[in-house]
């Protein structure tokens, strides 16, 4: 199995398999390939990112089933092993695709004999961060588990290069960021502000995380906004928000701000790019690569004064030029959901072959 670990490799793989959409009805030995998605359902059984990826594979011709894990802590994941075994007694599955290392452990302990693909989500590779270069020691067990499980997997998918560093079995390593549903995240000319009841003349900064999540670092945004003097700004914090409404907020906002201490491949940045929303982000995960040289999108340090400066630049850009061309960048990089599905199917094919 060949690992695809760099941007040129990813794009080469995309071009190789999407010219004729050769996996449009992917079969193996004459049968439709059946995949079981396993993921945490404690916070949201209908995880929009997982469901979106699964649906993109269904649209490509695969049969995907979803099995959310309900239960707190390691005990909940171990109980899921029994559910997996019972599920397979009544359902034929070719590949188990686990999202998050603890989901992978559930699949492993089920002892099904089926090949397991693991998608690393971020803190299972790097731990949870509570400050700049400051890891929460309580999350170290996730990193240990990710080291332990690798020999028992058929493939490991990392969302970004910084996540992939933990993968020591490089022949199993693939870098495949989550894709964006470009039919869902669309720049719109309709008045999203009216829909949300926002003031047409005010500048809005969008923060799409919980203020109480230390890793998301809202304090940096709060401190930066106090230093902005040229514009009348207000921060929008719609968390928790339905995924179907995120595009509306991105079209209504003047700037999306991501202030996290650490990320893997943040979906909100790619979704904002698809909506042509200006962005100010700390240099985390693959954000710098995703935005590239897109005008109206800026990388910042953790200094509140610099964050304020970059937000001001983004607001000036919006006032002078309107929205960005971020959507073109997403298409160029092949970060739409159908292209991502092609790359995942290529991993499945390598396993089955």
Image: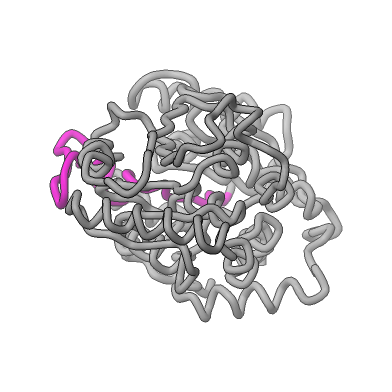
Whether 121 is among the magenta residues is yes
Residue 34: x, y in percent?
A: 73, 45
| Residue 141 in sight here | no
Residue 26: x, y in percent?
A: 79, 59
Nearest the viewer among 305 and 339 is: 305
In the rendered image, the quadrant that contains the C terminus is bottom right
Whether 38 is among the magenta residues is no
Residue positioned 27% across, 46% down in the render: 228
Residue 279: x, y in percent?
A: 44, 54
Residue positioned 47% across, 37% down in the render: 202
Nearest the viewer among 175 and 227 is: 227
Residue 295: x, y in percent?
A: 48, 68
Q: Is residue 115 above or below residue 70?
A: below
Residue positioned 78% across, 64% down in the render: 23
**Magenta region, residue range:** 115-143
- Is 168 on the left or on the right of 246, as rendered? left
């Amino acid at each position: 199995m060949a690992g695809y670990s760099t941007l040129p490799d990813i794009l080469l793989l995309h071009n190789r398999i999407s010219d004729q959409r050769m996996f449009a009805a992917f079969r193996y030995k004459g049968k439709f390939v059946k995949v079981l998605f396993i993921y945490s359902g404690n916070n949201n059984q209908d995880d929009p990112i997982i469901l979106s990826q699964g649906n993109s594979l269904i649209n490509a011709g695969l049969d995907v089933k979803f099995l959310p894990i309900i239960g707190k802590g390691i005990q909940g994941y171990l109980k899921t092993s029994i559910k997996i075994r019972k599920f397979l007694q009544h359902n034929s599955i070719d590949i188990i695709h686990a999202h998050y290392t603890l989901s992978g452990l559930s699949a492993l302990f089920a002892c099904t004999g089926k090949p397991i693909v693991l998608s690393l989500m971020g803190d299972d590779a790097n731990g949870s961060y509570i400050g700049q270069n400051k890891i929460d020691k309580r999350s170290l067990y996730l990193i240990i588990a990710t080291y332990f499980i690798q020999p028992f997997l058929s493939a490991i998918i990392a969302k970004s290069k910084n996540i992939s560093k933990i993968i020591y079995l490089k022949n199993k390593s693939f870098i495949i960021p989550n894709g964006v549903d470009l039919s869902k995240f669309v720049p719109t000319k309709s008045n999203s502000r009216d829909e949300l009841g926002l003031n047409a003349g005010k500048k809005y900064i969008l923060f799409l995380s919980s203020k109480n999540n230390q890793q998301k670092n809202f304090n940096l945004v709060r401190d930066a906004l106090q230093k902005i003097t040229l514009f009348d700004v207000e921060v929008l914090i719609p968390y928790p928000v339905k995924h179907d409404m995120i595009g509306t907020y991105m079209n209504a906002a003047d700037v999306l701000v991501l202030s996290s201490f650490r990320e893997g491949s943040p979906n909100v940045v790619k979704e904002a790019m698809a909506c042509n929303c200006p962005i100010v982000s700390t240099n985390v995960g693959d954000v710098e690569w995703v935005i590239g040289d897109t005008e109206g999108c800026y990388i910042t340090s953790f200094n509140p004064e610099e964050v304020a400066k970059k937000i001001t630049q983004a607001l000036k850009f919006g006032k002078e030029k309107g929205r960005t061309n971020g959507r073109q960048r997403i298409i160029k990089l092949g970060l739409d959901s159908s292209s991502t599905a092609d790359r995942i199917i290529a991993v499945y094919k390598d396993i089955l072959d």
